[in-house]
Structure formats: C-alpha cells, structure tokens
Image (tube, rainbow, N blue to C red):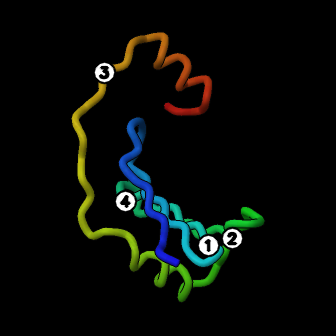
Amino acid sequence: MRPLLSQEIAYGPNQIGVTHDGDHLIYVPAREKTVLLDFDTGEVVDDDARIKEVMSYVPETQRVGSAVELDEETMDQLSDLGYA
C-alpha cells in the first residue's frame, strides 16, 4: 500500500505526517524532531531502522503557503486548544 502523506499545517510549526505499514511518523523540520508511533496503539516506537524507512517517504522539499491573518477570537480559540 502506498504511504499516506499529510503536511502543510496552517497554524504553528510545519509538521509532516506519514502513515505506512502500521506506523505513523510525525516530523517537525523546524525543531528537527521525529516521533514514530504504532498506528493502532499510539505507543512510541523506538526503532531507528523503521524511522529511517518511513522518513524515506518525506519529501525533500516542502511547499510553503501564504501567511494567514487570524482575528483575536480565533487566536483565543487556538490558544484554548493548546496552540501557542
């Protein structure tokens, strides 16, 4: 099955997610942070070989969209959800 790629988060640091063969990888390029989760259990997987394999599906370049202006009410709602 082809890996599922999601990226271009509209708010906060860009995060790239790849779901493949029961693994879900979250990669935050700005923070050089990578977390691999078991898709079914949500538990963190500490397996460098699997991380490397799933990271191979992350594109080398990312598209960057235009900035989004948010009103104060929306900013408050995002803050309530844990976004800084």
Marks 4 and 2: which is nearer the front? 2
For the residues labelled 4 and 2, the Cα–Cα distance comes to: 21 Å
Q: Position of residue 23 (x, y in %)?
A: 61, 73
- Within-10-Å neighbours for mark 2: few <14, some 14–19, many 20+: some
In this rendering, position of residue 59 left or right of residue 42: left
Which is closer to the viewer, label 3 or label 4?
A: 3
Task: Identify the secondary structure beneath mark 2.
Answer: strand
How far, Cα to Cα, is label 3 from label 2?
35 Å
**Disc 3 packing (10 Å; few <14; some 14–19; many ≥20):** few
Q: Which residue is mark 1?
A: 23
Under circle 3, the secondary element is: loop
Proximity of marks 2 and 1: CB atoms separated by less than 8 Å: yes
Measured in 3D between alpha carbons, the distance from the residue under mark 1 to the one under mark 3, in whole angstroms, is 34 Å
Is residue 82 something that shows in the picture?
yes
Which residue shows up at 43% across the image and 75% down it?
A: 55
38 or 84: nearer the viewer: 38
Q: Earlier in the sequence, mark 1 or mark 3?
A: 1
Chain-order first, disc 3 or disc 2:
2
Amino acid under disc 1: Asp
Is mark 4 in CB contact (under 8 Å) with mark 2? Answer: no
Q: Residue at x 48, y 65 (%)?
A: 4
Residue placed under numbered mark 3 in the picture: 69
